[in-house]
Image (cartoon, helix red, strand yellow):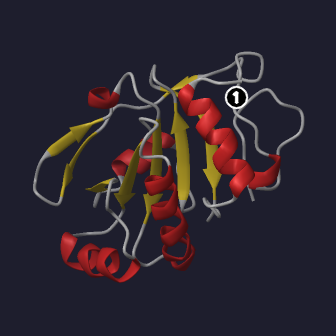
Amino acid sequence: WLLLESSRSRIPETAEDWHPPTSAMSNAPREAPAFELEDRQGQVHTLEQYRGKPVLLNFWGTWCPPCLDEMPSLQTLVTSMADTGLVVIAVALDDDWGVVDPVLQQTGFGEGAVVLLNPSRGVAESYGTVKVPETYLIDEEGVIVHKFVGAKDWEHEPFLRDLRAFVVGEE
């Protein structure tokens, strides 16, 4: 199921019904909480460093079957959107890289994406994440424009087309 944080009276139930936000649809935007998290190499990443680019921020865990189910299609989205400037950040809510690394290898996820670790789950909590996977679409100004709850088929062509139009600024 797809949940949409906006002023739309009808919440789309499938990616097929999703349409990119416009100012009329998003009259109560919420600034995305700042974060500092490390990647596998120990490099610190902040949301601020991606300002000026749209971000798809995904919270997941190795212990979450729906999270693992959506990873191949999320990787397809990363690959298919590589030329748009969309930054995909996947935040693992696990205790250490020792459990995350095998899952990334098994699922083939990570190439072209930013994978970070949030063992305290504090960043996920600051976003209001209560069920994983949860994914947030954040615009170039750092404003959350959509919240997706649950596993998604990120390969769904109408969704990809609409997301691409939003990211590159087409109506």
Give coordinates of residue 121: x percent, y percent: 36, 55
Front residue of 137/80: it is 80
Mark 1 packing: few (<14 Cα in 10 Å), some, or many (20+)? many
Q: Residue at x 35, y 83 (%)?
A: 106
Q: Residue at x 77, y 16 (%)?
A: 24
Question: In this image, 40 relative to 31: left or right?
Answer: left
Q: Residue furthest left?
A: 42
Front residue of 65/152: it is 152
Tell me how many marks there are: 1
Give coordinates of residue 156: x percent, y percent: 69, 59
Q: Is residue 126 above or below residue 102?
A: above
Question: In this image, 31 relative to 96: left or right?
Answer: right
Callout 1: SS: loop
Front residue of 34/165: it is 165
Instruction: State which quarter of the image contains the C terminus.
Output: top right
Residue under pointer 1:
21
Give coordinates of residue 53: x percent, y percent: 41, 28
Give the amino acid type for the residue marked by disc 1 in the picture: Pro
Q: Residue at x 37, y 74 (%)?
A: 108
Q: Is residue 163 above or below residue 24?
A: below
Q: Is residue 160 above or below residue 132?
A: above
Front residue of 110/89: it is 110
Instruction: State which quarter of the image contains the N terminus.
Output: bottom right
Q: Say which quarter of the image contains residue 131.
A: bottom right
Q: Residue furthest front?
A: 83
